[in-house]
Image: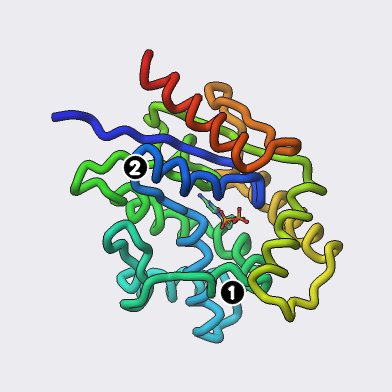
Amino acid sequence: MKERDVIAVDGPGAAGKSVCAEVAKRLGYALLDSGAIYRTLTLLVLRSQIDPHDVESVARLIKCNLGCISFWNNQLIFSGQPVRDEIRTPQISALVHHIAKIPAVRKLVVPLQRSFGAEDRLDIIAEGRDIGSVIFPEARVKIFMTADPSIRALRRFDQYREKDPAYAGTLDQVRNELRARDMEDTTRPESPLIRLPEAVFIDSTFMTKQEVLDKMLQVCYMRVAV
Ligand code: CDP
């Protein structure tokens, strides 16, 4: 039986990884947005009203409610509803790295990610922080994508304003949010974001979305041929 193809894309927030959705479409692959899982768990914590910094209570809550999270038709489902933009708020962005750094939480989420599309042996492109290092170390293609922090902050600021015209945050606040997340994501003891030596490096600082897309497709096709 043919092995399913896995493309792993890791990198910090607002680095340009959202292009993965278009890459997936072009290749006919399913897309796993692993950050969406951590964001959904953060939403769960916020709705529960427990102290998000009480590590044991958070881990217990998530363990008991993990069954509320699933995939249907490659779409992330939470409590029977498709997960949409409600997980992309500044409030969740400010908290998600605290939830994602809890080892017990990560342990629970690993099998969920590995099960994505596995039953149907779907080819997938998966994006996040530990995809190439922990979730799919066997991935055929690994990409590490980043961009200058000031450009990333500007991109995220524009996204917030586009989604919510009443958004009142400042560029400085967004820059600080990303900086705090970068710090936590790269220094946590459990599956930190790292640049693997075998990963193709893409710096999207001066690239348009189209250029990032072309580059990613080129990398994926090139690796198909060898
Ligand atoms: O969209 P953005 O790039 O800002 O972030 P995301 O991919 O939605 O991930 C949100 C947060 O989830 C990250 O800052 C990490 O703290 C966590 N995360 C993680 O720890 N491991 C992953 N594989 C994916 C996300």
- What is the CA distance from the residue labelled 1 to the residue labelled 2? 38 Å
Comparing 95 with 165, the one in front is: 165
| Residue drawn at (46%, 41%) of the image | 23
Placement of 111 over or under 196, stated as above or below: below
Comparing 171 with 99, the one in front is: 171
Instruction: Please tell me which of labels 1 and 2 falls first in the chain.
Output: 2
Q: How is the image coloured?
A: rainbow
| Residue drawn at (47%, 46%) of the image | 22
Q: Work out which residue is located at the far top of the displayed protein and give it.
A: 226
**Badge 1, how many Cα within 10 Å: few under 14, some, many 20+?**
few
Q: Is mark 2 within 8 Å of ligand 1?
A: no
Q: Which residue is mark 1?
A: 54
115 relative to 55 in the view: left or right? left
Q: Nearer the viewer, mark 1 or mark 2?
A: 2
Question: In the rendered structure, which amino acid carries the disc numbered 1?
Answer: Asp
- Pinpoint residue 30: horizontal percent, then vertical percent: 34, 47
Q: Quadrant of ligand 1?
A: bottom right
Placement of 147 over or under 171, stated as above or below: above
The N terminus lies in quadrant? top left
- Pinpoint residue 57: horizontal percent, then vertical percent: 50, 76
Q: Which residue is mark 2?
A: 29
| Residue drawn at (37%, 16%) of the image | 225
Element at label 1: loop
Element at label 2: loop
Q: Work out which residue is located at the far front of the displayed protein and give it.
A: 210
